[in-house]
Image (cartoon, grey):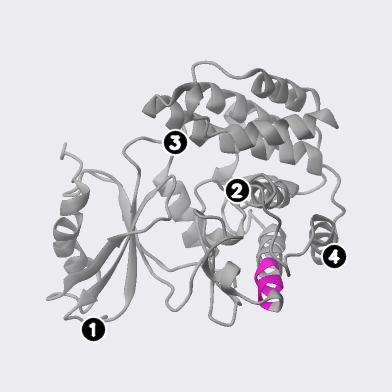
C-alpha cells in the first residue's frame, strides 16, 4: 500500500491526477496551493490551475487528518452528502471526484470546486472579534446570522429519503434516532479519552435518562454555524460547507449547536455579542417561524452539543498529552455545568 504523501509533496503528486480528471487540464499546473485554517477534522487545501481551460478557477482538496478526531470518520460519507445535496437548491460546492482506493497520494481524498468571491466568518479568532462578521455593519451582521438560520431551516425541510441519505442513520446504536445519538456519544467520548470528568459522566447519564421521541426526524447538518457558510460581499449566503458530522435526528440539534458555539465564542470568552447579532430568543422564534415547528427539546440538545464537541477536543488532548494544565474542553464543561444546573 502506498505511503501517505507528506503535505509538502501533495501538489506535485496530485497534479498528474488533475490533468486526467479535469477536462481541458491536460497541460495544467497546480498553482496557489495553500492549506486553509479551516478543516478542523479534515485536512483541506485550496488550489488553482494554470495553463488550462479552467485557468483562474478555484478548487479544494480534502483528505482525512493524520489523527482522526472521531472514531467513525468517513470521508466518503461527507462526499456523498454533498453530492446528493447538489440536486437541491442548497448552494453546496460541486463535487468533482473521490478516490478511496490505494492511490498515488497514499490514502482517500476528494476534490471539489471552490465557490469564488465568498468568505466564511472566522473560527479562530472568534467571528465576534475578527473577520467579515466583525467588520460588517449591524444590518449586515443580522443578515449573515439570519442567513445561517434560514439555511438551517431549509436543510431541515429536505426529505432525506428522496435524497437517498438513509445511510446517515446509525442503527447499530439503537432503534430510534435519539437513542442512537446518545449511545453513539457514549461510545465516541470514551474512545476519545481514557477517563471522563464527573460533569461529562453526569451529562451522559442525564441524556440517557431523558431520551425522547422527536416529532420530526430530519437531515441534521451536524456542524451548523456561520463559519460553515460562505458569504458573498453583500453578505448573502453563497455556499454551505462541511458535512462530516451530518446524521438523521432531531432538527433542534442543529439550532442548539449554533447557539452553543455562539455562546462559546462570545460570553465564554468574556466579551458580548457584536451589535446587530440577534438574541437567543429572537433566533429561536425565527427558527420556529421558518419551520412551523415549536422548539421543545433545546435543553437536551444543548447538552448533546457540548458532549459532542468534547469528542474531537478530548481526542486531540489525549493524543497531544496536554494533561490538566491545558484543558481545551473547558468551555464544554462550563456549559454542561450551567445547563445541568437547570435540568
Mark with earlier residue (2, 3): 3
Location of the N terminus (image quadrant): top left
Do labels 2 and 3 touch, CB within 8 Å? no
Point out the frontmost of discs 4 and 1: 4
The residues tagged by marks 4 and 1 sit, at their Cα atoms, a distance apart of 46 Å
The residues tagged by marks 2 and 1 sit, at their Cα atoms, a distance apart of 36 Å
The residues tagged by marks 4 and 3 sit, at their Cα atoms, a distance apart of 36 Å
Mark with earlier residue (4, 2): 2
Q: Which residues are magenta?
A: 140-145
Local secondary structure at mark 4: helix
Q: Mark 2 sits on what residue?
A: 222
Residue count near mark 3 (Cα–Cα under 10 Å), binned few <14, some 14–19, many ≥20 = many
Do labels 4 and 1 touch, CB within 8 Å? no
The residues tagged by marks 2 and 3 sit, at their Cα atoms, a distance apart of 15 Å
- Please provide percent x and percent y for residue 270: 66, 48
Mark with earlier residue (4, 3): 3
The residues tagged by marks 4 and 2 sit, at their Cα atoms, a distance apart of 21 Å
Mark with earlier residue (4, 1): 1
The residues tagged by marks 1 and 3 sit, at their Cα atoms, a distance apart of 38 Å
Q: Is residue 158 left or right of residue 110?
A: right
Q: Mark 3 sits on what residue?
A: 69
Q: Mark 1 sits on what residue?
A: 53
Give the main secondary structure of the magenta stretch: helix
- Please provide percent x and percent y for residue 204: 69, 24
Q: Mark 4 sits on what residue?
A: 289
Residue count near mark 2 (Cα–Cα under 10 Å), binned few <14, some 14–19, many ≥20 = many
Amino acid at each position: 500500500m502506498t505511503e501517505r504523501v507528506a503535505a509538502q509533496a501533495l501538489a506535485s503528486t496530485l497534479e498528474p491526477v488533475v490533468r486526467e480528471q479535469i477536462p481541458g487540464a491536460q497541460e495544467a499546473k497546480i498553482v496557489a496551493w495553500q492549506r486553509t485554517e479551516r478543516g478542523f477534522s479534515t485536512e483541506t487545501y485550496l488550489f488553482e490551475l494554470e495553463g488550462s481551460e479552467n485557468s483562474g478557477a478555484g478548487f479544494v482538496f480534502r483528505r482525512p487528518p493524520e489523527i482522526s478526531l472521531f472514531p467513525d470518520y468517513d470521508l466518503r460519507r461527507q462526499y456523498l452528502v454533498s453530492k446528493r445535496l447538489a440536486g437541491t437548491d442548497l448552494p453546496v460546492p460541486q463535487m468533482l471526484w473521490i478516490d478511496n482506493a490505494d492511490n498515488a497520494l497514499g490514502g482517500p481524498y476528494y476534490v471539489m470546486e471552490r465557490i469564488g468571491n465568498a468568505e466564511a466568518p472566522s473560527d479562530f479568532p472568534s467571528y465576534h472579534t475578527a473577520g467579515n462578521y466583525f467588520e460588517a455593519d449591524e444590518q449586515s451582521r443580522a443578515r449573515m446570522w439570519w442567513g445561517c438560520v434560514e439555511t438551517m431551516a431549509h436543510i431541515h425541510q429536505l426529505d432525506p429519503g428522496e435524497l437517498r441519505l438513509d445511510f446517515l442513520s446509525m442503527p447499530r446504536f439503537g432503534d430510534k434516532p435519539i437513542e442512537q445519538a446518545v449511545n453513539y456519544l457514549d461510545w465516541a467520548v470514551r474512545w476519545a479519552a481514557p477517563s471522563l470528568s464527573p460533569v461529562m459522566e453526569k451529562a451522559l447519564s442525564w441524556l440517557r435518562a431523558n431520551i425522547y421521541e422527536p416529532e420530526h426526524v430530519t437531515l441534521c447538518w451536524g456542524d451548523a454555524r456561520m463559519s460553515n457558510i460562505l458569504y458573498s460581499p453583500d453578505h448573502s449566503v453563497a455556499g454551505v460547507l462541511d458535512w462530516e458530522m451530518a446524521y438523521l435526528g432531531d432538527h433542534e440539534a442543529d439550532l442548539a449547536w449554533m447557539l452553543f458555539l455562539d455562546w462559546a465564542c462570545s460570553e465564554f470568552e468574556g466579551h458580548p455579542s457584536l451589535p446587530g447579532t440577534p438574541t437567543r430568543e429572537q433566533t429561536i422564534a425565527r427558527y420556529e417561524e421558518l419551520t412551523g415547528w415549536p422548539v421543545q427539546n433545546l435543553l437536551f440538545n444543548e447538552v448533546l452539543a457540548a458532549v459532542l464537541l468534547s469528542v474531537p477536543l478530548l481526542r486531540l488532548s489525549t493524543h497531544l498529552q496536554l494533561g490538566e494544565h491545558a484543558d481545551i474542553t473547558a468551555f464544554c464543561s462550563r456549559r454542561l455545568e450551567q445547563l445541568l444546573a437547570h435540568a
